[in-house]
Image (cartoon, rainbow, N blue to C red):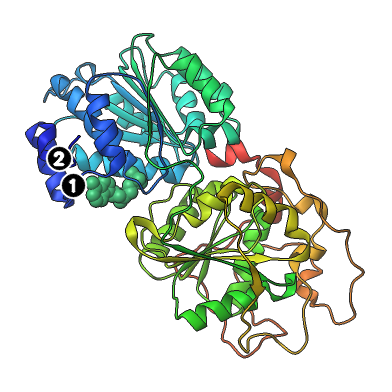
Amino acid sequence: MTSSFSNLHLAEPLARAVADMGYESMTPIQAQAIPVVLTGKDVMGAAQTGTGKTAAFSLPLLQRLMRHENASASPARHPVRALVLLPTRELADQVAQQIALYAKHTKLRSTVVFGGMDMKPQTIELKKGVEVLVATPGRLLDHIEAKNVVLNQVEYVVLDEADRMLDIGFLPDLQRILSHLPKTRTTLLFSATFSPEIKRLASSYLQDPVTIEVARPNETASTVEQRFYKVTDDDKRYAIRSVLKEREIRQAFIFSNSKLGCARLTRALERDGLRAAALHGDKSQDERLKALEAFKAGEVDLLVCTDVAARGLDIKDVPAVFNYDVPFNAEDYVHRIGRTGRAGASGLAVTLVTDHDSRQVAEIEKLIKKKIPVEPAPMADFRPARQSRSAEEFRPRREREFDGAPRTSHPHRPSRMAPRASADPFFDKPYEASAAAEAAAWDSRTAPVKSAGIKPKRKIAALFKAPVQTALS
Ligand code: AMP
């Protein structure tokens, strides 16, 4: 096996695109998967994002589609030949952008469709004809039902982030989509883990697949420094600020277990004078893309995310990841901290652990086969003399809505505590969407800052309403 792209004998336009990208050699998943996909075999790949798996499936797929390349303006000459399905809008957009880059010197066309956007422009693109269609399942079904797209000439299907698609509950949608495709085709399935559900999906839809595993599932990158800090709910934000200050870290991802927790935390960080933006399933597509772009452009320093919204985002070199909440699923811990320390860069993963997180911590340690000592949290001088109550303690139960974690794994939460006399009135109110970042009563030292490019938040009703599935696709 070789790690040089030149030995693959890719068509010249593809080889040129790879050279344009500046890739010097293949990543392990590419070295293993590309030759197999070139033979047309089905593949079951265990690879996480950041391993170069998008190129691992799209380059050989484009290579095999080169025989259909033509300059005709007729849509009939450009039927969908390859379908790439992903769980979230961001991932679909990201993968479509990469495919467009790899195909840019060819005459092969590609486009992306996902929910939360007007269907009309997508319909126009689809009707012009595209060889490669990247989609989230829900929106693709809308287009199939509206007869905007015909899939009877599909030769390749990629189920990317398949485990996450199942977690979100996309199995029925996937089954419906797959029923529209020709039986004779190549199917590629990529998943971070090979759970029994994934194996079942593979046995139903893949034929004699070649299994490729580049890193043992659940293995955490050795370049990530993992720290567990003991905190109370009240101290979490101060701990984050202290770590950022001590380590001189500017940008980080902060993970919250719920959409509302994510919204509240973002707001609180903004009130602390930090440049934060929220990324979760209740944000409009436009807001989410803007938050992502603002983070990439360095206009936002802290991206506060839920697991579903953040899964697989290709943002490189995030110096730190904070688990504001210990994830309910140990596997999510691995995915979260995989955002940092990618491609050989060192990263810091800080998990804020409270007294009621011990069960989840034990599960994480079991999964990663490593014991991580729970240390006292560094506390710079951010903590106000008068403590405010935390959002988590006093949030009504119905607000603790998950954004992606299966409900069956809902942990035991302590009962609500009696309100203290010195409570911060901010947390007594139900969540109110307001863009006004007035200074917090307990911390008037810092000037409020509004996150760049983030629109005013949505009304409370919208935050309670949208089910995870429709919010994502
Ligand atoms: P992915 O795992 O597909 O999300 O890819 C992660 C990142 O790695 C993307 O930004 C790719 O552009 C980049 N990448 C993919 N293949 C290579 C390669 N062979 N050499 C360097 N970077 C790569």
Q: Name the residue under label 2.
A: 5
Does 47 appear above or below 350?
above
Cα distance in 3D space between marks 2 and 1:
6 Å
Name the residue type under label 2: Phe
| Nearest to the observer: residue 471 or residue 385 | 385
Quarter of the image with the N terminus in it: top left
Pinpoint residue 143: horizontal percent, then vertical percent.
44, 25
Residue at image position (19%, 36%) is 103
Q: Mark 1 points at which residue?
A: 25
| Nearest to the observer: residue 20 or residue 3 | 3
Name the residue type under label 1: Ser
- The quarter of the picture where residue 446 lies is bottom right
| Nearest to the observer: residue 289 or residue 52 | 52
Whether the residue carrying mark 2 lies under 8 Å from ligand 1 is answered with yes
Is residue 110 something one can see in this rendering?
Answer: no
Pinpoint residue 349: horizontal percent, then vertical percent.
52, 64
